[in-house]
Amino acid sequence: MKILFISDLHGSYDRAKTVLDKAENFNPDFIVLLGDLLYHGPRNPLPEGHDPKATVVLLNSYKDKIIAVRGNCDAEVDQMVLDFPMMSDFSWLVADGRRIFLTHGHLWNPENMPPLTAGDTFVYGHVHRPKAYTDENGINIWNPGSCSLPKQSDRPTYATFEDNTFRVFELNDTCILEQTL
């Protein structure tokens, strides 16, 4: 199974388009959106290429592949214009026989984990910093970072899962982090 992970778009059409253009070559089975899709929030600057209306049209064109969860900047009005469900605080995905818990990270996060067991994977966004590690309980913890407002550096990121490997990429396709299960 091939999965593309995108988090914290915050309405950046330019960055969404860049990553989704890459998806055409990757051809994922699913595109996972980890929240904060359209609004930048009161604590963030406007991201490069901020255009929520165009972002809606672009995301809706992938509606059949999208699994999305609600971020702390997402609202019911966003659901009114998006053609895929995105108001759930979490979702589950089973990939290659592994349970994957998907959430934004403002409710469930590495400091406040849902009930998971060794071998499960916890994927979140919210902090705008990429991560890939296994915690002391044997749970894989992944974060694709942010493709619009990165906080680890000035390098926007997204992630993929393929052949049991999670990889975080910069927009220039440089792999900066990976974990194989």
Image (cartoon, rainbow, N blue to C red):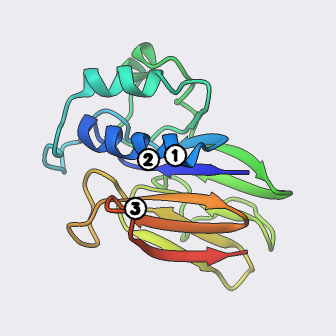
Q: Is residue 61 above or below residue 46?
A: above
Type of residue at label 2? Lys
Q: Quadrant of the C terminus?
A: bottom right
Q: Residues within 10 Å of mark 3 (few under 14, many from 20)?
A: many
The residue lying furthest to the bottom in this view is 136
At 60% across and 70% down in the image, what residue appears?
A: 141
Type of residue at label 1? Asn
Q: Are marks 3 and 2 in contact (CB under 8 Å)?
A: no
Q: CA distance from mark 1 to mark 3?
A: 21 Å
At 51% across and 46% down in the image, what residue appears?
A: 25
Q: Which residue is mark 3?
A: 145
Q: Is residue 4 above or below residue 129?
A: above
Q: Which residue is mark 2?
A: 22
Q: Which residue is mark 1?
A: 25
Q: Is residue 20 left or right of residue 46?
A: right
The residue lying furthest to the right in this view is 97
Q: Is residue 110 left or right of residue 60?
A: right
The x, y position of residue 5, in whole percent, is 52, 51
* Mark number, residue 68: none
SS label for mark 1: helix
Q: Quadrant of residue 74?
A: top left
SS label for mark 2: helix
Q: CA distance from mark 3 to mark 2?
A: 16 Å
Q: Are marks 1 and 3 in contact (CB under 8 Å)?
A: no
Q: Residues within 10 Å of mark 1 (few under 14, many from 20)?
A: few
